[in-house]
């Protein structure tokens, strides 16, 4: 039953050590901030990659996210886990980027060298995973963003609508479309 | 509920966000419609796969240098009082009662190994459809009785009911005594209806109407329990 | 001097007066603050009676009395959102009896744990949560949402939608509901006399009575009897033991189910429908002929047929009556 319920962005860490690291970074310690980058880069890059559908773009976005995080670190009050705060900030950076670019030329991130993506090993069938990742990458941008935020990351429609500045109904319609397109792409 | 309407509501159904009567309508339609059930199963498979994607993917190249080059040096912009916990314990996501309830109810149709197929147009005949988890659908128009065909569905109902009753048990001391009394009185009424329909079906094991009535009584019980745990 | 300034001075004077008063057991309240014509006013009263009335002035005025001298009314916010709250200098605030005047176009959110709530003359949304004591809404609000854990709930209004959640006490909805009238109730009777476009009722043991439905109706109850009357009826009505009576014209497919309760449909002579009646051990009586029997099922064509009407009972009697 528990597997049905997507976890909200799970915290990568939650220890007193992380607590100290964040505080040191807030005080201007770049080495501490690098540690925060190491701890969170995978999760942020995965989000950027799935939201943008483009590896190069995702690398740029990941860098933008951490630069923004450094600038805004002073506003983090510890009300939530740092990783949750960072994740939310990343979503805003990615969505903001999409808005500023308007309709972007869609590059398919999956080239003929899939091994380049250096994906961590997975227990379940890697073929299926790759197929789903690839199919997500080929969705139209709006539908893709909603699918990633809702079905992969576990945000609620209300939260996504607020972040995107759209209506909940629009968000639901996009999700419906994304799911339909994915199933078509996966041949189901 | 119609086929089209069920498909429209399916997204909300699998998330457990439908109002009770729509939820019930979809559930009933799913019990009877192979196409919609296949649709639901595929949707859930997709959602399971999406939720199981790895949360992290390491960037293919080192990005830190590029980030470090862009960081403006700064001293502490905020002086946090030491007693403010910067990171608290990881908040445990509380699953609301109604959602657990929805999940329990979803068991009835999703994990059903055998579903009851009632041919509405044809003569009183019930076919049992064995479904392996991977959805190979070997329709076996076996000459099984309605009672026999209903048996697996009944087990699913009972499992969902058991889950909900357990949830209710944990939470009932928070309810007003009068509310508990009302709930119990009404659950008794439904249990009586279940017993009656069940006895009648045992006596007349080929009656698809009775199998449907029994399933409606179980639905009523699920509805009441679901409401009770969401109080 | 602008009106706004005058009001602010008025409020200051009122506050000063209140402070100057000796600490008596009861404390009079008379405060006001200018605000915009729309937006939301949140009113939080830990215990006591709240009467909210819409008026044509763009100000919020709070009058009444507080039972403890250490309590006071705090008004905060600006043109859009406003908050009116009873706060205490020490501990939990005592009882309050307040009348709050708000600009008619505002939406109102009231929270109280005991004591009556009355809202009238507001054209915005009305949302109220009450842990005890009656709630009444009148006038022409937009969307009404009331949650009560005890005490009667009465809406007598011309609203766009009404939604009531109650775990005890009767629920009554009168007037006009242009959209959905929705009630979730545990034990009290539910009565909807409002002309309602759509009605959805979920009840357990209280009788359900809908007298003026104008379209789709969804009713689920367990042991309470259900009565539904109206025009262009469609949808579904279910209960286990209480019995169902439906009276009026059909507008679409309708299904009625009861396990052991009797089901009666009172239909006009000109009704055109295809009726399926299924009963295991219940009797059947019809003013429209006996139809064709097929095991436990019976099929009747009323007039030229068309709309699908299905009636299912286990042991309840089924009766089709011509009005």
Image (spheres, coloured by chain):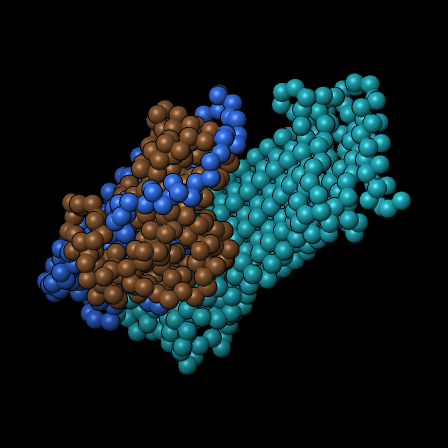
In x, y percent, where is residue C37? 73, 52
Q: Quadrant of the C terminus of chain B?
A: top left
Residue B33 rendering spot, x and y as whole percentages? 26, 64
Tell me what residue is drawn at x 48 percent, y 71 percent: C251
Q: Which quadrant of the figure has residue B134?
A: bottom left
Quadrant assignment, res B27: bottom left
Q: The N terminus of chain B appears in which quarter of the rendering?
A: bottom left
Is B73 in front, or is C322? B73
How many tags in the picture?
Answer: 0
Identify the residue at horizontal 81%, vertical 35% (top origin): C11
Q: Is residue C240 above or below residue C113?
A: below
Query: Which chain is rendered cyan in the image?
Result: C
Tell me if I can see residue B56 in this picture. yes
Which chain is painted in blue? B
Q: Is residue A27 above or below residue C3?
A: above
* Residue B201 makes an appearance in the image: no
Q: Residue furthest right?
A: C1
x, y (%) of residue C43? Answer: 66, 38
Residue closest to the far bottom: C304
Residue drawn where x is 52% and y is 61% of the image: C198
* Residue C23 appears left or right of B26: right
Q: Is residue C314 left or right of residue C202?
A: left
Vertically, is C278 above or below A21? below
Tell me which residue sits at (32%, 58%) in the image. Answer: A53
The x, y position of residue A14, in whole percent, is 35, 30
Q: Which chain is brown?
A: A
Front in this rendered view, residue C146 or B118: C146
The correct choice, above or below, for B124 with respect to C226 in the image is: below
Front in this rendered view, residue C62 or B199: C62
Relative placement, left or right, of B42 versus B64 is left
In this rendering, position of residue C57 left or right of residue A95: right
């Amino acid at each position: 039953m528990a597997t049905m319920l997507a976890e909200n962005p799970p915290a990568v860490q939650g220890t007193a050590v992380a607590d100290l690291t964040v505080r040191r970074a807030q005080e201007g310690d770049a080495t501490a901030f690098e540690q925060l980058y190491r701890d969170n880069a995978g999760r942020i890059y995965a989000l950027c990659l799935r939201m943008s559908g483009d590896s190069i773009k995702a690398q740029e976005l990941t860098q933008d996210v951490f630069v923004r995080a450094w600038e805004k670190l002073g506003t983090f009050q510890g009300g939530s886990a740092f990783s949750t705060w960072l994740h939310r900030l990343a979503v805003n950076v990615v969505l903001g980027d999409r808005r500023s670019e308007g309709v972007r030329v869609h590059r398919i991130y999956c080239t003929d060298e899939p091994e380049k993506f250096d994906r961590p090993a997975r227990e379940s069938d890697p073929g299926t995973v790759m197929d789903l990742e690839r199919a997500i990458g080929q969705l139209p941008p709006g539908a893709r963003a909603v699918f990633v935020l809702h079905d992969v990351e576990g945000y609620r429609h209300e939260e996504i609508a607020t972040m995107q500045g759209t209506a909940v109904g629009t968000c639901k319609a996009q999700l419906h479309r994304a799911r339909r397109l994915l199933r078509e792409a996966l041949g189901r | 509920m119609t086929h089209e309407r069920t498909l429209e509501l399916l997204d909300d159904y699998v998330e457990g966000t439908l109002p009770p009567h729509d939820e019930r309508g979809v559930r009933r339609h799913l019990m009877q419609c192979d196409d919609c059930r296949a649709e639901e199963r595929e949707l859930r498979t997709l959602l399971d796969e999406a939720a199981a994607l790895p949360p992290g993917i390491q960037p293919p190249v080192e990005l830190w240098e590029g980030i470090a080059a862009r960081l403006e040096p700064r001293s502490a912009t905020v002086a946090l009082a030491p007693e403010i916990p910067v990171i608290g314990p990881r908040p445990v996501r509380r699953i609301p009662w109604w959602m657990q309830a929805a999940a329990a109810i979803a068991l009835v149709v999703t994990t059903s190994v055998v579903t009851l197929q009632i041919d509405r147009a044809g003569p009183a005949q019930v076919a049992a459809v064995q479904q392996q988890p991977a959805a190979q659908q070997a329709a076996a128009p076996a000459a099984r009785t309605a009672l026999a065909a209903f048996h697996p569905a009944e087990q699913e109902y009972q499992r969902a009911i058991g889950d909900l009753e357990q949830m209710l048990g944990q939470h009932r001391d928070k309810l007003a005594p009068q509310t508990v009394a009302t709930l119990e009185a009404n659950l008794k009424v439904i249990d009586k209806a279940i017993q009656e329909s069940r006895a009648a079906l045992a006596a007349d094991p080929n009656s698809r109407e009775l199998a449907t009535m029994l399933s409606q009584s179980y639905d009523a019980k699920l509805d009441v329990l679901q409401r009770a745990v969401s109080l | 001097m602008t009106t706004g300034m005058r009001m602010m001075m008025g409020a200051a004077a009122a506050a000063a007066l209140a402070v100057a008063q000796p600490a008596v057991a009861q404390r009079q309240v008379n405060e006001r603050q200018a605000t915009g014509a729309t937006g939301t006013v949140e009113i939080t009263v830990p215990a006591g009676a709240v009467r909210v009335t819409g008026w044509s002035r763009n100000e919020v005025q709070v009058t009444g009395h507080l039972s403890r001298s250490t309590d006071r009314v705090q008004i905060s916010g600006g043109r859009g959102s406003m908050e009116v709250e009873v706060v205490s200098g020490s501990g939990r605030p005592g009882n309050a009896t307040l009348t709050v005047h708000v600009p008619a176009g505002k939406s109102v959110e009231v929270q109280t744990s005991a004591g009556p709530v009355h809202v009238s003359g507001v054209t915005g949304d009305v949302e109220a949560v009450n842990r005890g004591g009656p709630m009444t809404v009148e006038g022409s609000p937009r969307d009404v949402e009331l949650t009560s854990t005890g005490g009667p709930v009465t809406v007598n209004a011309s609203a766009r939608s009404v939604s009531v959640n109650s775990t005890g006490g009767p629920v009554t909805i009168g007037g006009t509901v242009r959209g959905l009238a929705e009630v979730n109730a545990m034990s009290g009777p539910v009565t909807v006399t409002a002309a309602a476009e759509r009605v959805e009722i979920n009840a357990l043991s209280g009788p359900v009575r809908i007298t003026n439905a104008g379209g789709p109706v969804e009713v689920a109850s367990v042991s309470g009897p259900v009565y539904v009357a109206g025009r262009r009826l469609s949808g579904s009505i279910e209960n286990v033991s209480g019995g169902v009576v439906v009276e009026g014209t059909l507008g679409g497919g309708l299904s009625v189910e009861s396990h052991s309760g009797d089901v009666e449909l009172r239909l006009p002579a000109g009704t055109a429908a295809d009726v399926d009646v299924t009963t295991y051990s219940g009797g059947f009586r019809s003013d429209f002929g006996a139809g064709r029997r097929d095991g436990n099922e019976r099929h009747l064509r009323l007039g030229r047929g068309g709309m699908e009407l299905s009636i299912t009972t286990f042991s309840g009697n089924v009766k089709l009556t011509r009005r």
